[in-house]
Image (cartoon, grey):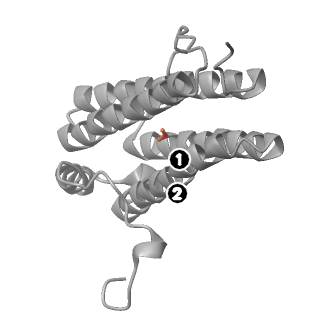
Amino acid sequence: METNRLSPTLAQALNDQMTNEAHNAQIYLAYASWAADKGYDGISNFLFRHANEERNHMMKFLEYILKRGGKVVVTAIPAPGPDPVSVNDCFEKVFKSEVENTAKIYDIVNMSMAEKDWATWNFMQWFVKEQTEEETLAMDLLSKIKVAGGENAKDTALYNLDRDMATKPDDATLAQDATVDNP
Ligand code: FEO
């Protein structure tokens, strides 16, 4: 008896996104290693922690495909691309990568809606929210490096930024959770 509840198109898209999330983890691992090598231990720590989050995202897709009776196809993970050339470049790359990931998530939402696969649509809403958080977090990184001087940031500013990053929370607060007392 056929128990697969995913269309071939959505199964492919979900598998592709599972690999994309593994690719995202590789990107954060590469940037974290770059930062560690340059002596930015706080930034490195933050990026290593985030690599784990991306692996968790990968696992959510894997589990969802299995639970819907689909076939998981584990493939090679694309290389993360060139190292950043500066902290400013690193944070810009992180933001760009998250925006690209959001577009991929939205594509699957659109596909699930077109197929009226409401289970997948519902599953994907977690990622819609997560991507809003991830983009907010990445925008925050860009604000910090901008205040520090962007590409022209001096060593002292980078030192302070790096120190702050070691204790930076892993999640951003969303607008929908804001109140007058706690904006
Ligand atoms: Fe899993 Fe940062 O997107």
Q: Quickly name the residue at label 2.
A: 132
Determine the residue positioned at 44% across, 67% down: 174
Residue positioned most to the bottom = 180
Within 10 Å of disc 1 (Cα), the crowding (few <14, some 14-19, many 20+) is some
Type of the residue with mark 1: Phe
Q: What SS does tag 1 mark?
A: helix
Q: What SS does tag 2 mark?
A: helix
Determine the residue positioned at 47% across, 23% down: 22
- Image quarter where the C terminus lies is bottom left
Q: Quickly name the residue at label 1.
A: 127
Where residue 172 appears, x then y in whole percent? 37, 60
Give the mark, 2 or 1, whose residue is nearer the N terminus.
Answer: 1
Within 10 Å of disc 2 (Cα), the crowding (few <14, some 14-19, many 20+) is some
Distance from Cα at disc 2 to Cα at disc 1: 8 Å
Q: Nearer the viewer, mark 2 or mark 1?
A: 1
Report the side of 12 relative to 56 (left or right).
right
Give whichever of 119, 44 is nearer the camera. 119
Residue positioned most to the right = 114
Type of the residue with mark 2: Thr
Where residue 78 appears, x then y in whole percent? 55, 15
Give whichever of 111, 35 is nearer the camera. 111
Report the side of 163 relative to 55 (left or right).
left
Residue 121 seen:
yes
